[in-house]
Amino acid sequence: MSQDFLTQLEKHLPQPIRKLITDAGKKACEMGMELYLVGGTVRDLFLGSTNFDLDLVVEGDAIELANELAKDSQAKLTIHPRFGTAKLSFTDFSLDLATARSETYSKPGALPTVRPGTLKDDLFRRDFTINAMAVCLVPQRFGELIDLYRGKDDLEHRLIRILHPNSFTDDATRILRALRYEQRLGFKLEPETESSLRQNIAMLDTISGDRIRHELELISKEKEPERVLRRADELGVLNRLHPSLRGNGWLGEMFSKARQFAQRVSLSVLYLCLFVYRLTKQENDEFISRLNFPKASAQAMCHTLKLKAQLPVLTTPGLKPSDIHQLLRGYAPPAIQTNALATESPVASQRLHFYLSRLRYMRPALNGEDLQRMGIPAGPQIREVLQILHRARLNGEAQTRQDEERLVRIWRQTTSGTKVDTE
């Protein structure tokens, strides 16, 4: 039994979670199975961090065990029979159970062929030694650490180490994961691991765009993703994704500003738009195609560069708020926010922020039904008057409902030639 682990368990996992995994171990034992806590949770507990997304490996039938555990809890049970996995979702945490399995790769970059296996097989398929530790949960061995690859020693020496020489060849997404863990944890790549990484950067070409994009999405969720991108730039990894990508000091400054000043836009999409801000349209199109970005993200990235090219117009002296709105209303908000952060023009930045914080939310108080009650017939005239009212709102010429009603009466007078009381 690892007293070190039990101490961390007591310190960093709430009592309901500790009880759940203890009960799960007992249930597994009753069913003739072995149950282990594995992966990131074990790593984080030894590091003194909290991780409520628990991964369990079952030497036995994970789905059968999950069904039994679900009977005695209020958790939502999701099962995936094809993969031999199940998930118990609670209010504040989740429990993933997987049948122990082995993996083989038919060729570099291919998705692995999965077969049932032992705990040893399951640990061997993992990416780094610090993620290849397990702790037994059955009562007789509760808290026993299984550390076949000296992951705890690497934790203590703050090293990221692959399990075998073909690791990056089999799955080059591990290159990006290595850099993400290195920067998140403040670790260093173990020398042979770094050497292997450098030698296998070209293997990223064997990975589909969807899988690389997924790794970039995970990087964007880090506390300071620019650190990962800077390291990837230093090692030549970004160059393999596209020769024009950079993870330099400018990007770090922009990401830091994004965290401070983001206005109601997805931070991960904002990061992405800043990432491509200095690319040409052609380079951006190539990057989008290579990584197969979904429509919303691709649109925001394209809008970013399109708006960047239009910024000189936004600095024209004397622009009214309605002019600013007309210029910007068709652009995705992350593209506008990106340009507000990245432009070197104070005037453009101020007007972009003004649009994001105020102009895009301004609407007339009157609607189409109100206008019909005031005698305006349904059809194109309704649209015309609403546009007039919207411009008046934007420019501060109509600040109340009464102001808008007055403008409608003036419009009717002008179009009909009949004098209408506008007081």
Image: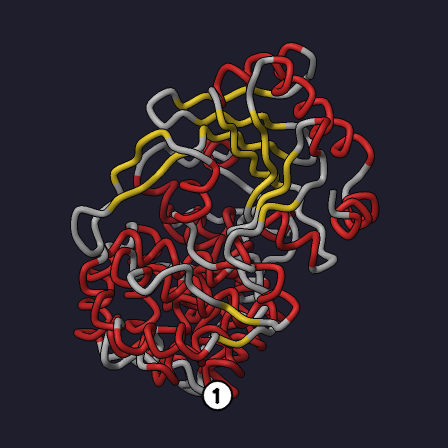
Q: Nearer the viewer, residue 322 or 7?
A: 7
Q: Nearer the viewer, residue 162 or 280?
A: 162
Q: Amino acid at mark 1?
A: Gly
Visible residue check, residue 309: no
Whether residue 8 is situated above or below residue 205 in the rendered picture? above
Q: Nearer the viewer, residue 18 or 419?
A: 18
Residue 394 spot, x, y in % from top left:
53, 62
Whether residue 90 is situated above or below residue 113 in the rendered picture? above
Whether residue 21 is situated above or below residue 279 in the rendered picture? above
Quarter of the image with the N terminus is: top right
Residue depicted at 24% across the width and 74% down the height: 240
Residue 132 spot, x, y in % from top left:
51, 51
Give the number of marks.
1
Q: Is residue 215 left or right of residue 391?
A: left
Which colour assignment does the render follow? secondary structure
Q: Residue furthest top?
A: 71
Q: Quadrant of residue 166?
A: bottom left
Whether residue 137 is situated above or below residue 212 in the rendered picture? above
Residue depicted at 31% across the width and 63% down the height: 168
Residue 372 spot, x, y in % from top left:
46, 32
Residue 181 spot, x, y in % from top left:
52, 65
| Local secondary structure at mark 1 | helix
Residue on which the image places disc 1: 249
Q: Quadrant of residue 383?
A: top left
Residue depicted at 44% across the width and 80% down the height: 230
Residue depicted at 71% across the width and 56% down the height: 49
Q: Is residue 222 left or right of residue 284?
A: right
Visible residue check, residue 40: yes
10 Å crowding of disc 1: few (<14), some (14-19), many (20+): few
